[in-house]
């Protein structure tokens, strides 16, 4: 029979495990939702590129500003940024899943 101190230690370890698992699941759900939002933004931006290219008029005054954010290039910049953020979210999601699996293996 285990002493009360050993039983309390087992209860605390189990409680810590359940809290860390719950937090990992919350992170995974949050990253998944964020990734889905960015996929929708990426699709929306990719669909809107032809509309942006139709307005391809660059005046001399516009050349003094940023050439990257003029109409012909703006859609590609937006799609690139959204894709980069989506890649970061997917990497964080994979890391959280790996950490959760290692937590499961450590518990077993």
Image (spheres, rainbow, N blue to C red):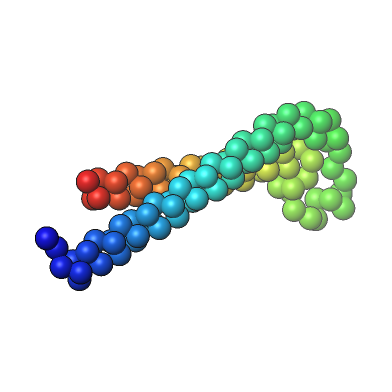
Q: Quadrant of residue 8?
A: bottom left
- On the question of residue 100 being in view, the answer is yes
Residue lying at 64% horizontally and 41% vertically, measured from the top left: 37
Q: In which quarter of the image is residue 38?
A: top right
Residue lying at 72% horizontally and 34% vertically, measured from the top left: 44
Above-or-below relation of 95 to 19: above
Residue 84, visible in the rendered structure? no
**Front one among 86 and 67:** 86
In the displayed orientation, state which residue is furthest to the front.
1
In the rendered picture of this protein, how many numbered marks are placed on residues? 0
Please state the horizontal and vertical placement of residue 29, each as a whole percent of the image.
52, 45
Q: Position of residue 22 (x, y in %)?
A: 44, 52
Q: In which quarter of the image is residue 23?
A: bottom left
Q: Where is residue 67 in the image (x, y as percent from the top left)?
A: 74, 48
* Pick the front one: 9 or 91: 9
Residue positioned most to the left: 1
Residue 71 x/y as whole percent: 79, 41
Residue at x 78%, y 45% (from the top left corner): 70
């Amino acid at each position: 029979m285990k002493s009360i101190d050993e039983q309390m230690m087992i209860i605390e370890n189990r409680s810590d495990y359940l809290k860390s698992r719950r937090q990992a699941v919350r992170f995974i759900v949050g990253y998944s939702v964020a990734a889905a939002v960015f996929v929708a933004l990426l699709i929306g931006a990719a669909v809107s590129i032809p509309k942006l290219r139709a307005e391809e008029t660059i005046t001399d005054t516009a050349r003094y500003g940023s050439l990257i954010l003029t109409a012909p290039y703006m859609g590609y910049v937006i799609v690139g940024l959204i894709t980069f953020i989506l890649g970061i979210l997917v990497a964080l999601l994979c890391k959280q899943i790996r950490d959760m699996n290692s937590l499961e293996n450590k518990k077993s």
